[in-house]
Amino acid sequence: MDADNLYAVLRSRDRRFDGRFFVGVATTGVYCRPSCPAAMPKPENLRLYPSAAAAQQAGHRACKRCRPDAAPGSPEWNLRADVAGRAMRLIADGLVDREGVSGLAARLGYSERQLHRLLLAELGAGPQALARAQRAQTARILLESTGLGAGEVAFAAGFASIRQFNQTIRQLYGLTPTELRSRTAGKAVKAVKAGHRAVRVQVRLAYRPPLDVDALFGYLAARAVPGVEEGGAGFYRRSLRLPYGTGVVDVTDGGDHMRCELLLADVRDLAVAVRRCRVLLDLDADPREIEEVLGADPVLAPLVAARPGLRAPGHVDPAELAVRAVCGPGDGLAELVERFGEPLGSPVGAVTRLFPPVAALAEAAPIAAVLAEVAPIAEALATGRLTLDAGADRDAAERQLRTVPGVDERTAAYIRMRALADPDVFLPTRQVRQAPASWRPWRSYALHHLWAAA
């Protein structure tokens, strides 16, 4: 946008632009969300950055009022299916912390140098800087919402040393870790130890309004698998299988945010758990942008007007979603969980088990008749013939899905929509057999509006 339009956006304090870009102020060395309530700087002092990491690389520290690092993610990365989009989803899922930049590059089929150049051009920062920004945000959450010691926070957030942790926090937030923690004194948010390294963490999940909370929780509750999930009016909780351990998430409506409480067996899983919950709840979407497109269609216009902020929920575990899609609703899923699901050490409400891992389902398939239907997809996922994760190429994944026995065209599309959080998938309904091209790239949302109306 040109300078005049940009300044108008900043003066409007429009929250829709939070996370899409960040604003640095040359005179103060601070970077902000576009909606920051602080006094407007002069136009000549503004600097724009495509990511928080880019602003940090330029020497800016995060504003203490608007907390730009906690802004909703850009909806662009859910929409884009190119290498940059896949890389961003994998970085957010913690791959760089677990496997390094070399692991990220290998997963995407690029050299480290090629990947660095690509991300630098798109986001103003390379993969290490993007991962560093995420580590800093994780550390801030732990400092502000738990009683963990600074050393525990540093290594749980993925820092290699206490010194690196202290330097990063001071550089990016303008405060020491102790000062950052003291700013939340009196909020009565304490860590609850639940066992070795286990911790309870409370996180505010930001989103762009509006959000149809009742429809979102209702959709998840209607599809909840007994033992694994529980949902109702104003809440949803479920068990999580994470890279370092297990967890349970409990989400409630916080008014202008989602209130998320995580019970984690290993606190190193915090960033991954938060990212997967955001995908599940579709919190990085921009509903007004979607509704501008869909609301122009005469079929969808009354539906969009009736349900502003309707989301297209993703999932916390693509492999689990794929198995569930093949199995279908009913008693079969409950039996799978009862027979092969691992009991949780610390149940929460009606959430008592983890969904069975695909490796266990594939191994038990020859001796368990109940697994006959899901055995082919469980085996494909367990052996790596089928890849469904944050960095999957959506077109390639759908082609792979179509080769798995028991996965028809409709099932493959449904898995693509929810497991891979694709915003542009359509399944024929009674009202509409084929979606018009004008609904692109938001056909998944059009489908949810049709489902909700039916």
Image: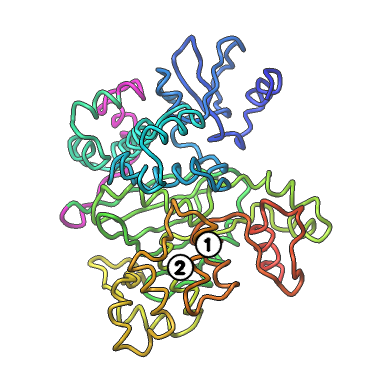
Q: Is residue 250 magenta?
A: no
4 over 161 or under it: above or below: above
Residue at 60%, 35% (x, y): give it: 15
Does the image show residue 352?
A: no
Callout 2 crowding tier (Cα within 10 Å): few <14, some 14–19, many ≥20: many
* Residue 61 image label: none
Does the image show residue 403?
A: yes
**Magenta residues (range):** 170-196
Q: Main secondary structure of the magenta part?
A: loop
For the residue pair 32 and 348, the one nearer the viewer reads as 32
Residue 312 placement: quadrant:
bottom right
For the residue pair 417 and 190, the one nearer the viewer reads as 417
Picture coordinates of residue 57 (x, y %)?
A: 40, 22
In the rendered view of the protein, which quadrant contains the N terminus?
top right
- In the picture, measured across the screen, residue 78 lies left or right of residue 145, that is right
- In the picture, measured across the screen, residue 433 lies left or right of residue 334, that is right
Q: Going by the picture, which residue comes out furthest to the right?
A: 298
Residue at 40%, 41% (x, y): give it: 110
Q: Which residue is mark 2?
A: 321
Q: Which residue is mark 1?
A: 418
Q: Is residue 172 magenta?
A: yes
For the residue pair 298 and 105, the one nearer the viewer reads as 105
Picture coordinates of residue 199 (x, y %)?
A: 25, 51
Picture coordinates of residue 101 (x, y %)?
A: 32, 39
102 over 223 or under it: above or below: above
N-term-proximal mark, 2 vs 1:
2
Residue at 32%, 37% (x, y): give it: 135
Q: Look at the numbered disc 1 and give the secondary structure of its residue.
A: helix
Evaluate if marks 2 and 1 touch, with contact meaning CB atoms under 8 Å apart.
yes
Q: Amino acid at mark 2?
A: Leu
Residue at 55%, 30% (x, y): give it: 21
